[in-house]
Image (cartoon, rainbow, N blue to C red):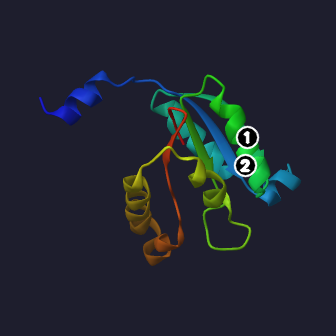
Amino acid sequence: MGTWEEHREGARKQLDISLVTISTSKYLDRTKKDISGEIARNLLEKTGHRVLSTTIIPDRKDMIRRELLRLLISDTDVIITSGGTGLTSDDITIEAITPLFKKEIPGFGELFRRLSYDEIGGASMLTRAAAGVIEGKLV
């Protein structure tokens, strides 16, 4: 058995996950459905994980970091954010989160763009998806 197989074999099968949607428009108008958040929750639960919390916050660096810090001291294993990774001036999720990474996982963004390409073509290069580890938690 190879090293990656040993890691996979020893990995937990169920993770506790927190979802954070970053969208000023959804934050201000709570009647708007958080479709991406609902899809993420359904996929995670269908694959055996537990979603501990879902939150909607605006595109504000201070609020993004405050929510992240709150979740870092919680029982969650993984924090998944959605939104704010594009190229407009409001898209500041990456600027808010990546400076906090102790370790970055560059392969995540690469794989995300590759899989997105199959769905949306060349527009996939416009995402700045990123992942890393902060305080031992995957973000």
Q: CA distance from mark 2 to mark 1?
A: 5 Å
Considering the image in quadrants, where does the N terminus appear?
A: top left
Residue 80, x across and y down, in percent: 58, 43
Q: Residue extending furthest left?
A: 1
Q: Does residue 55 show up? A: no
Q: How many numbered markers are drawn?
A: 2
Residue 132, x across and y down, in percent: 48, 46
- Residue under the image location 49 percent in, 50 percent down: 131
- Residue under the image location 27 percent in, 29 percent down: 7
Question: Which label sits on residue 3?
Answer: none
Relative to 80, is 115 above or below? below
Closest to the observer: 56 or 33?
56
- Residue under the image location 44 percent in, 63 percent down: 116
Where disc 1 sits, the SS reads: helix
Q: Give amino acid for label 2.
A: Ile
Q: Is residue 89 left or right of residue 36?
A: right
Q: Give amino acid for label 1.
A: Glu
Closest to the observer: 109 or 136?
136
Residue for badge 1: 67
- Residue under the image location 61 percent in, 62 percent down: 85
Relative to 121, is 131 above or below? above
Residue 115, x across and y down, in percent: 39, 60
Q: Is residue 112 left or right of residue 8?
A: right
Q: Does residue 41 show up? A: yes
* Label 2 Cα neighbours within 10 Å, binned few <14 / some 14-19 / many ≥20: many
Closest to the observer: 74 or 102?
102
The reply to whether callout 2 and callout 1 are in contact (CB within 8 Å) is yes
Where disc 2 sits, the SS reads: helix
Considering the image in quadrants, where does the C terminus appear?
A: top right
Residue for badge 2: 64
* Label 1 Cα neighbours within 10 Å, binned few <14 / some 14-19 / many ≥20: some
Residue 28, x across and y down, in percent: 88, 54
